[in-house]
Image: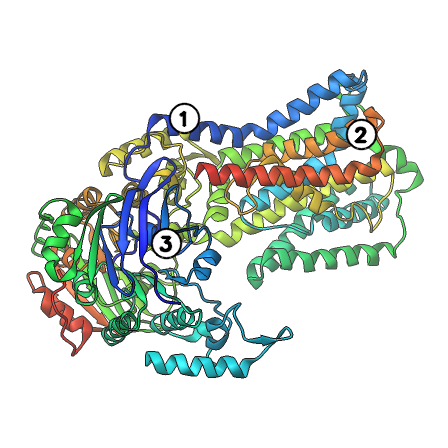
Amino acid sequence: MTAPAIEVRGVAKSYSGVTVLHDVDLDIAPGEVHGLVGENGAGKSTLLKILGGAIRADAGTISFDGEQVSIGSPRDAIAQGVSLISQEGALVPALSVLDNVFLARWSQRGGLIRARSDRRRLAGLIEQTGFTVDPGDRVDRLSIGVQQQVEILRSLARGARVLALDEPTAVLTEHEKANLLGLIRRLAAGGTTVILVSHFLDEVLSVADRVTVLRDGALVRTGPAAEQTPRQLVRDMVGREIDVLYPDPRPVPEGAPVVLSARGLSRGLVRGVDLKVRAGEILGIAGLVGSGRTETLRLLFGADRGAGVVEVDGVALAKHSPRRSMAAGIALVPESRKEQGLVMQRSVTENVVLSSLPQRRVGPFVRKNAERDAVGTVSKSVDIRAADPGAAIETLSGGNQQKALFAKWLLNKPRVLLIDEPTRGVDVAAKTQIHHLITDLAADGMAVVCVSSEIEELLALSHRVLVLRHGRPVGEFPRGTSREVVVAAAFGDQEEGDRS
Amino acid sequence: MSVDTTPQPTAVAPAATMRSARLAYRLRDYGIVAAVVAIVIVLSFSTDTFLTSPNLVNLLDQMSVLGLLATGATVCIVSGVFDLTASASLALSAIIGVEIVRHTNVVVGFAGAVLAGALLGLITGTVVVRSGVNSFVGTLATSLVYRGLAVVVTGGSIIYPLTRQSEDFGMLTWPSVFNLTSATIVFVVVVVIIGIVVAATTFGRRLYAVGGNIEAARLSGIRVGSIHISAFVISGVCSALAGLILASRAGSAQSTMATGMELTAIAAAVVGGTSILGGEGAIWRGIVGAFLLTLIGNGFNLLGWDTIYQQVLQGCLILFAVTMDRWLRRRSR
């Protein structure tokens, strides 16, 4: 099957009354690499998922070579030769690479699987792609990068003529990234259409033939990649020149005492992390995905138990656990709101008071009035905009959810605040508010440890930045250190080009 | 590198969709009540006997066992676990109760049965929490153990209180205020207490949080293990009380009591609108579910329908209820 000319006409999608895609028209030529860029929530993943059959559009049509096609399910998409590789991954963890590649498409004769013929086909594909995977390995034992290769192999095995990739490079090492981009170019040269969603504009520009910018669910512009610059793309993405103003943290007062200190934290990939944070200080932890940043925070909070000592005011926390940490005044805003932070189907109020229930009770009973007052006050202070505090927290925007997560911990009046990805999946306005909140809390004397994948954010907010690589501290940099230096430390010897 | 999965709704939804969303929520919240009211109205008009006080007294008495079990099931499901030991605990604690009655008196025996139910819940909960086995599988296994112990204790035969105790032993069938049976009173009092505990205490809050997102609850400093164990203890007490009501009615206890009823209890909870995924639901919902299932039996009797179709109808009703639930959920999200 040769790649079709794709025509998208008037595609729209909304969730509970909120429009996420608005009347999008898009043409993609056969065999081209098409980049889709936009801010979080601009609708690029949604558009990709509609093409890949993962979700259904509310309106609009998709045509291949002038003929309208119906892609209502992943099955339809596969039949049309469209293969979606999403961020979530769609492998069966307990099966081998071979079984995953040919999942539900095994060679068979009389109902029996002919593994040998599959193995031969897979060997051919591996050679074609230049991947190094062992067909017999169980998929859950492979790194995320290799897992992604398995998904690509599967797409090829299914004869995909349109490959839709959602943020494929976010989790890859530099080397894997270069390989993947090379493969994309080779596939396109071989006639496969590739649609690429990515936050990394340089990457998109280097590999794509044409680029489409989405903003707030609408298509802003489509044009040849060669005529674009990252700066131009960013302007289209946000609709204006970006000037994200970060608040400056107030200098740490002379002689501020060390509140949190840790020695020899180790568990799994984290090896011997030492740190000290003073009252009023913001310590940033930088590193690549998989460098042990999140794991370090979890060890500090006692969410996982490992070797090493965590001290608050010089007193070691014995039998470290989240409860023990809370009693000592530590709070953790975890990486994922949905998985670790919030009880999504419960109300805003119930979520906000969850970690401080004992503060507002008579005997076993919740004091509803005190609760309402506390939630009202703290909501105002962090500016949670919820029409009804009794509504399920999942009905709030990402920014308001994140602020609720901060509010929950502020009710505990912590002295040490550990924050993992403070502004992930949060809109620009809320992002700025959260930045101010963090610097304000530090100015009031809180000791803050902050992990972020957004290096600008980290450099702007922190007094010091600790860089981890492969679970080990590899350097500590004072405020004002350039981005290049910190990134170079995170990557080790490899240099990384400026991306923005 | 940020992750962008579902788009974050940033705009305020237009008034019209808000209104329809709220309507969907309300439908979801109280749809089951509407169904019950509809059946009550139909039965009231189509029979002379439904709205008579003997029938209503009888109906409440009938539902007291299932109602108690549904209450225990709801507490467990809300906290994110299943208790498949309910009917086995029911039998075993009733049997233990009768044994104690034989050696002491009825009051001490009944108290002993309740204590036994609590203890069995404690054991189930501890096994599930400490082993880390999925509660469905873990309680399936413990229920076999409990049912087996019931056989061992009774030697497989029916056990009775002593002859002189048999009148007192039937105390839960005695009429009391408003002519309701004592069993009904026990049921109502216990359910109201548990309903308040779940709805208004800090324990209740933790229960919902653990069921809704166990990791978020743990990171909020909640002892998730003790919450689960407490849920099993409450379920055990409910089972024991249900067992006493059954034993008191029959004047005896045996190892095969109420076999399979744990599943009807779970069905009642779910029909009432408690989410099988945990973190959502309410005690009153379990009671409404139990009432509905009991009502169907009562309706069959009163209308003179052939009861061989009763189970088919109950099954269809359960399917209908959970399908509606899923449908409304998908629409409103």
Disc 3 residue type (three-letter): Leu
Protein image colouring:
rainbow
Question: Which x, y percent locates residue A416?
Answer: 25, 53
Q: Picture quarter containing residue A231?
A: bottom left
Q: Which mark is residue B19?
A: 1
- How many marks on residues? 3
Q: Chain of mark 1?
A: B
Question: Which x, y percent locates residue B103?
Answer: 84, 46
The mark nearer the N terminus, 2 or 1, is 1
Secondary structure beneath label 2: helix
> Dot 2: within a 10 Å radius of its alpha carbon, few (fewer than 14), some, or many (20 or more) residues?
some
Question: Which x, y percent locates residue B231?
Answer: 58, 46
Disc 2 to disc 3, how far (Cα)?
52 Å
Location of residue A289 with respect to A433 vertically, above or below: below
Secondary structure beneath label 1: helix
Residue A213 seen in the current view: yes
In the shown orientation, is residue B318 left or right of residue A385? right
Q: Which mark is residue A310?
A: none
Disc 1 to disc 3, how far (Cα)?
31 Å
Seen at 26% across and 55% down, the residue is A421
According to the picture, the residue beneath numbered tag 2 turns out to be B300
According to the picture, the residue beneath numbered tag 3 turns out to be A51
**Mark in front: 1 vs 3:** 3
On whether disc 2 and disc 3 are found on a single subunit, the reply is no
